[in-house]
Amino acid sequence: MKLERELMRGAGPTAVLKLLSKHEMYGYELVEALSKQTDGVLAMGQSTLYPMLYNLEAKDLIEANWRSAANGRDRKYYSLTGKGKKKLKADMEAWARLNEAMVSIGVLKGAPA
Amino acid sequence: MGYPNRIAFDLLDSADLPSEVDALIRATVKRSKLWASERGEIVRELIAHTQDAIEAGRTGEEIAETFGDPKRIAKLMRRSMKGKRPVYWRAYRNMKRAMGVMVLVLIVGYGSLAVRFYLGKPEVKRNYIAELNARDDGYSEDQKAWGVYQEADIAWQRHTLEARKRQRAQAQEREMDRSDDVDRPWAWYHAGLDRLGSMTPEHPDYLEVVGLLRAFEPWIARIREAAQRPALGVLYSDRSEEVEIEDGIKVVRVLPPSDDPAAQRALAEVLLFNFSVMRRFTYMLKFDTQLALESGDSQRARANLLGQLGLAKQSKQQGFLISDLVGIAILDRLGQDLNEMLLAYPDPWTRDQLVALAHAISTVQSLPALGFKTEAMMFDDMLQRVYTDDGHGNGRLTRDGLFVLSGIGGGSFEGGPEFRVERAIQSLTGPMTLVMMEDRKTQYDSYHRMMDTARRVLEGGPESIGYLSYLDGLSKARVEQRLSSNYSPVDLFMPAMTKAVDRAFQSQLSTQATMTMLAIEIYQRDHGQLPESLDQLAPRYLPSVPQDPFNPGFPLQYVVGETGYIVYSAGADGDLDGGVQIDPEVDRRSFRSLSRRFSFEIEHGDDGMPKIVRDAKGLAILLEPDAPDSDWVLIDMRRAPGPTGSD
């Protein structure tokens, strides 16, 4: 199941920031991670991922640099900046509140007490 | 393949990706409209992505399937990449956008102005030309002079033409090629007889011109008679044509103006051809006066002087600024001529003749100095042709009006290519003048306020000469406040008025000196000797002792020596230098500008009018106390180098 575009627009960047908070990643790696770890819910192709990465880069939330990988090919690695870390923290809190609100009105099921 | 894609496509060429993916990336890059380096960056990343996918076991087809629509990707890439561009580029883009908005605002603004400009139509209601012509309605034909002048003008052309033919024939009979010489005197006629005034018996053409004038004497007598008629009776019209009524004889034929003022041209464009004819006749009378005195015919000389005064009077009665200036010029020259004649031929003048002459001069002098009324008519007529009329004295500029103003302000020749270009530019820029140019009411108020000031300055007595700079200042203030423009009616009409006021002041001074001279001459005939001071002339010979406008509070100066007397003014420096005029020629030539250079310190009174600032002694404070140190000798009745050493 894939998310609607509007929902993806809100969730996608936070998901990317969260993945990059663990370690730096390159584009294809991110695509794979998003697809596998979310069971395809947050899967996105190049057409969505790269514009999103460039936007995050323009906002100084992530930074990128080209490096040669072990197989000898060049890859562009993305990592979180200080500003990106703060943004991720704020986003996660917002998502948590949203989650609580959704639970309270019955859209989501609450965790068992 | 254009330059912007070169880097990107070179990378793709060397990457050797599956053809379907390669095509999708190329299509995306082409549509991105990004900088070449940005396209390269995207392609490099997409190549890496594709290669990673292949390494992970994906086929080209699978990759292409998840790629998405190139058009949409290109759009998203463009938007996100531009966000990464440097600050200066974003500042430039924002500036471009702001300018775009400004241009849009301007276009919308111009559009609404253009609608107002092109839809506005002037309403020409008053027939000023008819009002002008109505002034002579009460006079019969034999009380009007113009008919005689017109006939005399034709007769003079015929007279000179016949004489010229005769001379040419004689030259041919003598088989002499003297055509250049023969043409010489006629050249003067075409130059308006202006040089007759300075012609002396030593001149090679003197005898020929004398002969011409003597043979024209019956007509000169008719001109003299017509000059005494109470009305000029010329028909003013916006329609006239020059026609050759006989071979070589041209006259201006006036066609009656239309009864509909909207079909007429502006009053300011009415051709005032009559004044050049009248000016020609004054030169003729002046020259004939000289001839009369040389032959001892003092009666004819006096009649000529009175004829010139009559022409001056008729000219001034027309009430145009130009006709007043013609009148002023005739009067000024007459004063100088009289000075020279009384010096050269003192005897023929009896007391009564001098008194009659003084009365004739004072009649002309008492007419309004400048035609404020007719000038104002021209201006008001202009407004009704230029602006719309809201019924409350206000209105806005119209397209037709702008063309009228441009015509009067000296536009290109109508019908020529330059004219069409000028019209096109005016049509295009015209709407903007709605913003730049004052509305009808402001123009009306501004002009009439300045005219009112000019009138009050002129009527303000001798001291007013110092206010000239103030009057000039009004025009300058408009320029400084950026109210002035080439197409502004006020600025087209007003500068001529300030110059004319200056000229009128100078004329008042010289006519005053002429009247003083006549009073002295009459006194001399009564008492057998010259007066000791000008105080002795008032009130019997002059209503009051003549005051010197350049030396406020003091009269004109009068010095008697062994050989005669002089009457002089303090001149431009405003102080007395014993009647010494350093360089009479230079001073005389700069007479016009001197009153402007000479000015008092001025403050404003409660009524808004300027007032002269005075020192403790009540004397005017001069702004240029160190101006040229010289007096102006207005009347010089010395028969030899005089006692004041001015020569």
Image (cartoon, rainbow, N blue to C red):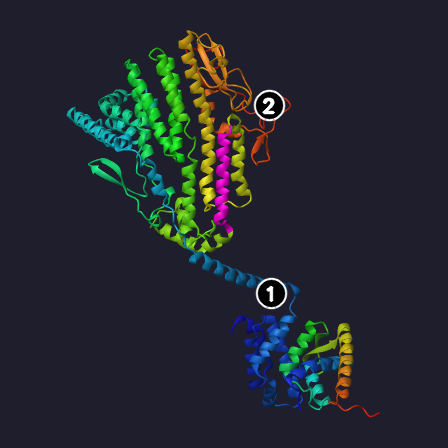
Q: Nearer the viewer, residue B232 or B112?
A: B232
Span colored in magenta: B436-460
Q: Can you give x and y, in whole percent of width and height, for residue B560 in the image?
A: 47, 10
- The picture quadrant where one finds residue B72 is bottom right
Specify whether residue B536 is in view.
Answer: yes
Q: Can you give x and y, in whole percent of width and height, for residue B295 in the image?
A: 27, 14
Residue type of the residue flagged with mark 2: Leu
Q: Residue furthest right?
A: A113
Q: Given this view, does label 2 or label 1 mark the residue nearer the observer?
A: 2
How dense is the environment of label 2, judged by Cα within 10 Å: few (below 14), some, or many (20 and up)?
A: some
To which residue does mark 1 refer? B93
Label located before the other in sequence (2 or 1) = 1
Find the distance from the CA under tag 2 to the CA under tag 1. 68 Å
To which residue does mark 2 refer? B619
- The picture quadrant where one finds residue B376 is top left
- Above or below, B413 relative to B116: above
- Above or below, B40 relative to B465: below
Q: Nearer the viewer, residue B338 or B14?
A: B338
Secondary structure at badge 2 equals loop
Do dots 2 and 1 share one subunit?
Answer: yes
Secondary structure at badge 1 equals helix
Residue that appears at 50% across and 61% down: B107
Q: Nearer the viewer, residue B626 or B320?
A: B320
Residue type of the residue flagged with mark 1: Arg
Please tell me whether residue B439 belongs to the stretch shown in magenta.
Answer: yes
